[in-house]
């Protein structure tokens, strides 16, 4: 009788263990799906591919910039999913030949992702290193160009030894970390 009870207890513990593992996996998956959501997947794929960008990069930038809120406006006046300044939007519209540009178009999900991907591609071409490119997306290309000329920040004018703005440094590493979580999901 004792042997039977012991076997039943082992089975119960075994089942409880696997239920606990299952719940932990579900919890972790749910957490990451909330922390790293994917919306507008078709637009991300379309424009990341068009501008030769990693899809994970675009998804991570959108998540960090706006948390996928197409109506987001920053305290600096950047608009939409990829937080594009109206002046940058105007510049991009001219480069893309978009004659019907208005600041309001930056709230449109497809337009914002298209413009953001174009701009990331432009920065990627100008600054070949991903960290430098992301720093320029956050701090501005003029600022990053000055950093690259500073021998304390760059010994080759291409790579940054350090990112002097903590906001930009944190931003850059959050994007790179986010890319890992988007890998294989988009």
Image (cartoon, rainbow, N blue to C red):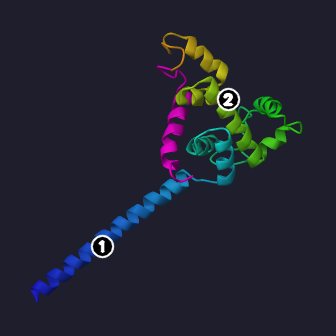
Asked if residue 48 is positioned above or below residue 37 in the image, the reply reads: above
**Residue extending furthest toward the left:** 2
Asked if residue 134 is positioned above or below residue 19 in the image, the reply reads: above
Which residue has dot 1 on it? 16
Q: Which residues are magenta?
A: 160-186
Residue at 77 percent across and 32 percent down: it is: 92
Res. 150 visible in picture: yes
The chief SS type of the magenta part is: helix
Asked if residue 135 is positioned above or below residue 115 in the image, the reply reads: above
Q: Residues within 10 Å of mark 1 (few under 14, many from 20)?
A: few
Residue 166 located within the stretch drawn in magenta: yes
Q: Is residue 163 left or right of residue 63?
A: left
Dividing the picture into quarters, in which one does residue 147 lie?
top right
Asked if residue 78 is positioned above or below residue 151 in the image, the reply reads: below
Res. 86 visible in picture: no
Residue 62 locus on image (x, y percent) = 63, 43
Q: Is residue 15 left or right of residue 178?
A: left
Q: Is residue 12 left or right of residue 175?
A: left
* Callout 1 secondary element: helix
Residue at 86 percent across and 38 percent down: it is: 102
Q: Of label 1 and label 2, which has the lower sequence position?
A: 1
**Residue extending furthest toward the right:** 100
Residue 166 locus on image (x, y percent) = 52, 27
Residue at 34 percent across and 67 percent down: it is: 20
Checking the image for residue 122, the label placed there is 2
């Amino acid at each position: 009788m004792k042997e039977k009870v012991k076997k039943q207890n082992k089975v119960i513990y075994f089942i409880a263990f696997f239920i606990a593992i299952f719940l932990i996996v579900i919890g972790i998956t749910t957490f990451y799906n909330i922390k790293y959501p994917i919306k507008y997947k078709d637009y991300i794929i379309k424009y990341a591919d068009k501008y030769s960008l990693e899809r994970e990069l675009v998804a991570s930038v959108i998540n960090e910039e706006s948390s996928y809120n197409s109506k987001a406006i920053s305290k600096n006046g950047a608009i939409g999913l990829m937080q594009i300044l109206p002046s940058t939007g105007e510049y991009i519209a001219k480069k893309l030949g978009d004659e019907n540009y208005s600041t309001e178009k930056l709230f449109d999900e497809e337009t914002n992702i298209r413009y953001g991907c174009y701009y990331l591609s432009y920065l990627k071409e100008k600054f070949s290193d991903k960290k430098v490119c992301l720093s320029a997306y956050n701090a501005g290309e003029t600022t990053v160009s000055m950093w690259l000329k500073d021998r304390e920040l760059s010994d080759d004018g291409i790579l940054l030894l350090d990112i002097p703005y903590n906001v930009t440094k944190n931003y850059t590493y959050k994007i790179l970390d986010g890319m890992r979580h988007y890998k294989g999901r988009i």
